[in-house]
């Protein structure tokens, strides 16, 4: 094996290591993004449940919705 072959092998080995490092970083980033999306979906579902509960509570109270109480006078009259 001559010196040119050794340099070529070393360069190839360096490129391979660099690619493995990049792949590891990309894998880690993908895992973190998946976790973030999972947490956001949980928050969305929780907020949707809260909104539904508020709507049901509002409907059960018999209070007219926005624009529904046009005949009512404001409390300061």
Image (cartoon, rainbow, N blue to C red):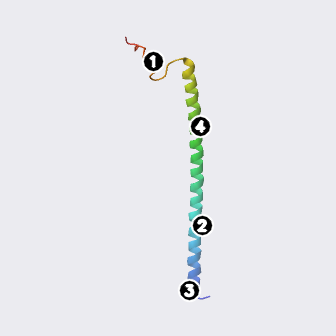
Task: Of the two numbered discs 1 and 4 on the same chain, state the one appearing first in sequence.
Answer: 4
View extreme (left): residue:
77
Task: Of the two numbered discs 4 and 3 on the same chain, state the one appearing first in sequence.
Answer: 3
Q: Quadrant of the C terminus?
A: top left
Task: Of the two numbered discs 2 and 1 on the same chain, state the one appearing first in sequence.
Answer: 2
Residue beneath label 3, please? 4
Q: Is residue 53 above or below residue 25?
A: above
Q: Residue at x 57, y 19 (%)?
A: 60
Q: Toward the viewer: 1 or 66?
A: 66
Marks 2,3: beta carbons within 8 A: no
Instruction: Select label 4 or label 2 by which is in front.
Output: 4
Kind of element beneath mark 3: helix
Q: Which mark is residue 45?
A: 4
Kindly report the distance in space between the C-alpha atoms of the residues bearing marks 4 and 2. 37 Å
Residue beneath label 2, please? 20
Kindly report the distance in space between the C-alpha atoms of the residues bearing marks 2 and 3. 24 Å
Kind of element beneath mark 1: loop
């Amino acid at each position: 094996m001559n010196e040119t072959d050794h340099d070529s092998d070393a360069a190839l080995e360096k490129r391979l290591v660099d690619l493995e490092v990049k792949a590891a970083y990309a894998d880690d980033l993908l895992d973190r993004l998946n976790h973030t999306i999972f947490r956001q979906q949980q928050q969305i579902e929780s907020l949707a449940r809260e909104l539904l509960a508020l709507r049901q509570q509002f409907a059960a109270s018999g209070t007219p919705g926005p624009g529904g109480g046009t005949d009512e006078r404001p409390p300061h009259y």
